[in-house]
Amino acid sequence: MGIREGGVTREWGDSGSKDPAEVGLRAGIGVPIRFWLWFGGLWFLPGLAFRLYVAYGLNEESAGDRVVAVLTGVVSDLQALALVFAFLGLGFLVGARFARWWLGFTLASVAVVFIADCTYWLEFQSRFDRFVLHYAQYPREVLVFLDEQFFLGLFGVPFAILVWLVTRWISRWLPERMTRLDRAVFCLWILVGVGVAATASPGVAGHSRHLHHLSSNGYLGILMAMGVDESVWDGFYWRPDPEDPDVARALAATAAGAGERGPGTRPAEPAAAGEAAAEAVVAMADDRGSRPAIARPETFRHVVMIIEESLGGEFWRDAEKRARYMPRLKALAEGGLSFESVYATGGFTIRGLEAMLNGFPPLPGVVVTTEPRLERLPSLPRELGRAGFRTVFVYGGWPGFTSFHDYWRRIGYHEMLDRYDFDDRWFETSWGVADEILFERVLEEMDRLAAEFDRVMLTTLTVSNHRPFDFPDGRIDYPSDERRREYVIAYADWALGEFFDAAERRPWFDDTLFVVAVDHGPVHAGRALVPAQGFRVPLVFYSPGKLPPAVIGHQGSIMSLAVTLFELLGIAPEESFYGKSLLRGDGPVPVELHHEVGMLGRDRMTVLVRGGGLLGWRYDGEKLTPDEPDIGQAVQADALFRGAHERLYGVP
């Protein structure tokens, strides 16, 4: 197709007259329009197809809501397309020869973003968020993860050839030289892109996380994450109005119970903590009303805390799956203090570490491992170090990924081991050594430390229960080459059981309090804006002969682990930790995902939405159903999260 001029049709390859005005007419009006249409179609249609595919599978949502989300998503994609056009225009301003290279680079980039956006959705049921920005700081590790899990190396050459072919095909509509009109169009796209970047809103807000992310895309998700200033709280989250009668009553109730529920409280005064444990009676009732006795604190010389990766959710809630895939952990729970209604604070390992090792609630956008103000937070290893414990962290993964090594050093661990300290890494994935290798090293370290130090606190974090779900062959009755989550859970459970079988034969076993905890559930399952029903995780305190078996039904958070541990050890901490001892009744259950935070109760959940809104759900222990927000929970959430935010950022 060409341009009709004076009865003659000129194709793009026909040079014709070299008059600048004529060249400008073809380049600015004819060819560039076709180029933008072809490029826009190639970019837009795959995204629309994927959005329709996702919408078709969201059976929990009504057809009308899905249609609205898809149409809103089309608008979101048009906004993102304007950003891509602006990116193209920026390179095209350099000149026509450079434009062809810039086009190829842009096509490759948008293809990678599209594939990554789809993959992220299939894994997390959401668009890109702030954690993508965080992980982008560690490109080497991330590329190794992706290559191992999705075989990027196999697709690299075919991908490059495809991009080259598409670039050659679409670049035939690019002008041989840029005119003033072309440059004016490029500048216009850049201005439009800047406007979109400044004003775009990612998707529809509401109760459904699925619809919210379905109506957005990865470009707008990243834009929002980049535009959020986490240090500012006021004006972005709901704040109680004392003039509102419902709020006034809730504020009064919160003030009355601040000694138990308020943020930053100590578990007990020094004398009370020691007396409660020394008397060997703690008021902790399970569903049958039993009151088991607790050993005297001085009998626990050592603490071994095992943090299992992603071991929870439906595999722990479902009794049949628990018995099938986690029989060893099930047996440990039956032989120790098992807390059956404990919830993680979020959906990532960073959230679990922050909750358990810092006793701190999840603040939106805060990545505790790289937080420059980390020293303002309480620290479990630092507190135990003051009490005479030698604190050690044994990890089988990369020390630099998400700044783990630096984080553990800053919160007070005396020694830290990583994958490079393992002489025989005979089985490892990109995430780290297999659990059985990790536990063998934990045994060796405890042998050494218990002989050298009077009191030891050793922490370890497993990694096997993570994509690509590879594990050594011949360990369990399930095949190791199918990369299925339930099979690697069974392997992680087996390795945990083998560790305890070996530990029982060690001389330090009887003096040790074992804590088996989980950082977060396996997936972000559920349509709620914060799918907290999937945050339920196991928590077991185990010490045969010193801790009698009991099922503790109190609802609580892994954020309260440190406070509970202090009570069992008879330690009155100098620092102020958040949470309430899980031995003493229901405690606060803060939850977070992306930039939304909330409080989960026995039958309700209320979420503070970024932007100032409140949303509520009914909760039956298995499912969250949209409902009106609970003002009392909202007031508690405001007090907890606002107080934690002020503590971290030093706001008076």
Image: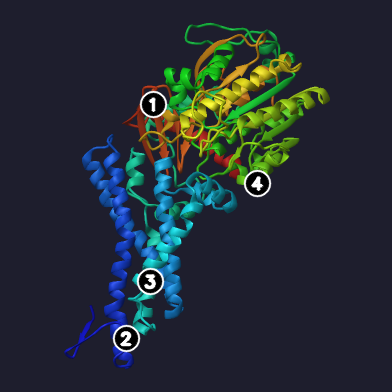
Looking at the image, is mark 4 or mark 2 earlier in the sequence?
2
Mark seen at residue 52: none
State how far apart marks 3 and 4 are (Cα): 41 Å
Label 4: state its secondary structure.
Answer: loop
- Whether residue 575 is visible to the viewer of this picture, yes or no, is no
* Residue 160 image point, x, y percent: 45, 62
Q: Residues within 10 Å of mark 4 (few under 14, many from 20)?
A: few
Q: Are marks 2 and 3 in contact (CB under 8 Å)?
A: no
In the drawing, does residue 402 fall left or right of residue 213? right
Residue that badge 2 annotates: 24
Label 3: state its secondary structure.
Answer: helix
Residue that badge 4 annotates: 400
Q: Residue at x 34, y 71 (%)?
A: 170
In the drawing, does residue 23 fall left or right of residue 485? left
Residue type, mark 2 in image: Gly
In the drawing, does residue 259 fall left or right of residue 109? right
State how far apart marks 1 and 4 are (Cα): 39 Å
Relative to 393, is 103 above or below? below
Residue that badge 1 annotates: 604
Residue type, mark 3 in image: Arg
Quarter occupied by residue 475: top right
Looking at the image, is mark 3 or mark 4 earlier in the sequence?
3
Please tell me whether mark 3 or mark 1 is closer to you in this view: 3
Which corner quadrant holds the C terminus? top right
Residue that badge 3 annotates: 168
State how far apart marks 2 and 3 are (Cα): 23 Å
